[in-house]
Amino acid sequence: MTIETLDDLRNALLQNESPNKQNFTNNYYPFWEMSEGQHAVVRFLPDANETNPLGFVLEKRMHNLIINGEKKSVPCMTMYDEECPICKVSKAFYDKGDEDRGKSYWRKRQYLTQAIVVEDPLPPDEQTKENYEGKVCCLALGFQLYNIVKDAIKTGELDTIPYMFNNGVDFIIKKSKQGKYSTYALGSKFMRNNRDLTDEEVALAQRDMIDLSTLLPRKPTVESLQESLTASLNATAATMEDTPTASYEAEDVNVAETAGYQESDDGGEGGDEADAILAEIRNRKTKA
Ligand SMILES: [Zn+2]
């Protein structure tokens, strides 16, 4: 489920490694591997890049395309302040009343941050005999966890900046069962007590904190993005009768989060543009 997303994330990162960047591909804390009922405790850390306007979190937007039955994760061009052809296609489907395909083409957001893992319920690695406790890791938060963090800050539940070294607040990531799915929305929260990092934790943080922007994928060329999109659209169109979009979405652990995806849509224009885009899609299919 979410592991697929991490694989996508790893692949995206692997493709974007450059000699100047450290290799952080294996440095994501896979908190989603915990069992329902378990929890981890983490302490968020600031972005080493002090120009980050959000201080400790960076939004990553990706599209999942299904090409030849396989999921391919590609960057959303809005991350680079450019028009995104895949967002356009998604909106066109929504405007046509096709919510399933609108949703499957919509951008998926993750919130990248980093933290010291204070308590880790995961079993130790077979080789190193260690788990993630006492390490600085990257975290890819989904909509549920990010909302809890954001709301706590916005509503004044916290009286301090949670990721500061002194007088900050640890955060509990709790996985619960909700119906058929796991959720983080029920028990995850900031701890009640503030605390200073220990000298050891401060040294660790200062050594291992990274510039979060190094985690973002490199901007794809418009051509390569368009190529992937066209391949995906043609595949979808070819199997339109029995397209597995719905079940694919249900398998995604972020399904409970998709309700939020539309919020950030800029909305606005519809009708003619939607018709034009869908006509273009049909033409592609005819030509193929
Ligand atoms: Zn996009």
Image (spheres, rainbow, N blue to C red):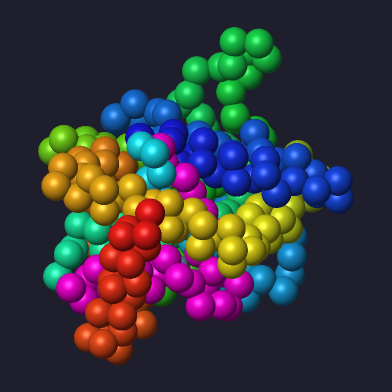
Q: Percent from the top left, x then y, of residue 198?
A: 70, 44
258 displayed left or right of 232: left
Quadrant location of the N terminus?
A: top left
- Residue 71 in view, yes or no: yes
Q: Quadrant of residue 268?
A: bottom left
Magenta residues (range): 70-96
Q: Residue at x 34, y 72 (%)?
A: 280
Q: Percent from the top left, x then y, of residue 274?
A: 27, 79
Q: Quadrant of residue 157?
A: bottom left
Ligand 1 lies in which image quarter? bottom left
Q: Residue at x 40, y 28 (%)?
A: 34
Q: Percent from the top left, x then y, of residue 154?
A: 41, 74
- Residue 245 in view, yes or no: no
15 displayed left or right of 250: right
Taking the view exactly as shown, the residue that stands out farthest to the front is 287
Quadrant location of the C terminus?
A: bottom left
69 displayed left or right of 56: left
Nearer to me, 260 or 133:
260
Query: Can you say whether 91 is above or below 199 in the image?
Result: below
Callout count: 0
Q: Residue at x 68, y 14 (%)?
A: 128
Taking the view exactly as shown, the residue that stands out farthest to the right is 20
Q: Percent from the top left, x then y, of residue 75?
A: 54, 59
Q: Residue at x 75, y 46 (%)?
A: 17
Q: Is residue 56 magenta?
A: no
